[in-house]
């Protein structure tokens, strides 16, 4: 029996549906299935026995209700849209004479960003009518409207830096702003926070890692992000916006995770700001 036929039979037997199941490909995307359900356990057990299948890509995403989110003193926060092109106008860095200087100082060996040395130049048109977005390098970009609102709210732990259109730098009022989070938290509590795929540049000393997301059920590999934990003492030094001491991601394209307080979370909801998500951060003794 072909893999596709066996999968279709399994779906019918368990009354499940699939999205994106092309006729000429042996893969499908299951409609979201509760990872704590009996059906999910059965799925993993049967996949474990299907030796014909050698490449299984399962992803588990956590969902949180309002009670869980509104009771967490700290929350992992980030824009959900990534629309702004990288600051590729740094042409001088690549040997182009006469181009603008690079926005970041980088390690000559691993190319990791070490320090931002000028305002970002971007294609402002990519922002569209959004108030909040990310560059491809994970810098947080605000519309001038949202930047003004954030400034008026008086949040701590941030600075606003102008972002200019690459064809008209420093002309008139900045069309966009970069949200720079200035308060760096101490290292996470590890354990129970788990990390994987750690890297270190021997030249600049930059160390990066990933929050653990690789798990195994027998021979079946699946993706599930683990939770983030801090010691309760971290609350003594938090500001409204914070970033992790840990640099997350591969060299050279690492970024720090942003941690916000309940004050920011409630303000974002009250003012109807769109394009972001949160998950609880847990505190331990």
Image (cartoon, rainbow, N blue to C red):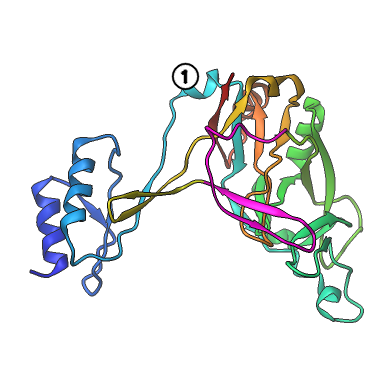
- Report the span colored magenta: 186-211
Measured as percent of width and height from the top left, residue 280 is found at 53, 29
Q: In which quarter of the image is residue 235?
A: top right
Q: Quadrant of residue 36?
A: top left
Residue 246 percent location from the top left of the image: 67, 44
Label 1 sits on a secondary structure element that is helix
- Residue 224 found in image quarter: top left
Q: Nearer the viewer, residue 214 or 28?
A: 214
Which quadrant of the rendered structure holds the C terminus?
top right
- Residue at image location 77% in from the left, 26% down from the top: 153
**Front-most of residues 16 and 186:** 186
Residue 247 belongs to magenta span = no
User: On the picture, is 55 further left or further right than 146?
Assistant: left
Q: In this view, does 100 lie above or below 180?
A: below
152 is higher (above) or lower (below) than 129: above
The count of marks equals 1
At 72% from the left edge and 61% from the top edge, which residue is drawn? Answer: 201
């Amino acid at each position: 029996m072909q893999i596709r036929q066996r999968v279709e039979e399994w779906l019918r037997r368990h009354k499940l549906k699939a999205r994106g199941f092309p006729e000429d490909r042996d893969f499908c995307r299951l409609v979201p299935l509760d990872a704590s359900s009996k059906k999910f356990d059965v799925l993993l057990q049967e996949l474990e026995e299907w030796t014909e299948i050698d490449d299984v890509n399962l992803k588990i995403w956590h969902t949180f209700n309002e009670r869980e989110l509104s009771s967490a003193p700290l929350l992992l926060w980030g824009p959900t849209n990534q629309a702004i092109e990288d600051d590729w106008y740094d042409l001088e860095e690549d040997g182009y004479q006469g181009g603008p200087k690079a926005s970041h100082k980088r390690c000559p060996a691993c190319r990791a960003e070490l320090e931002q040395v000028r305002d970002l130049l971007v294609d402002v048109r990519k922002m569209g009518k959004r108030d909040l977005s990310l560059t491809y390098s994970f810098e947080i970009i605000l519309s001038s409207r949202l930047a003004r609102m954030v400034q008026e709210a008086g949040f701590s732990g941030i600075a606003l830096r102008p972002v200019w259109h690459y064809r008209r730098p420093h002309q008139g009022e900045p069309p966009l702003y970069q949200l720079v989070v200035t308060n760096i938290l101490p290292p996470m509590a590890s354990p129970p926070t788990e990390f994987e795929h750690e890297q270190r540049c021997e030249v600049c000393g930059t160390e990066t890692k990933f929050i653990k997301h690789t798990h195994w059920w027998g021979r079946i590999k699946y993706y599930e992000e683990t939770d983030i934990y801090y010691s309760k003492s971290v609350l003594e030094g938090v500001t409204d916006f914070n970033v992790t001491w840990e640099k997350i991601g591969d060299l050279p394209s690492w970024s720090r995770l942003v941690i916000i307080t309940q004050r920011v979370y409630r303000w974002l909801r009250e003012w109807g700001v769109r394009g972001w998500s949160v998950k609880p951060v847990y505190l331990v003794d």
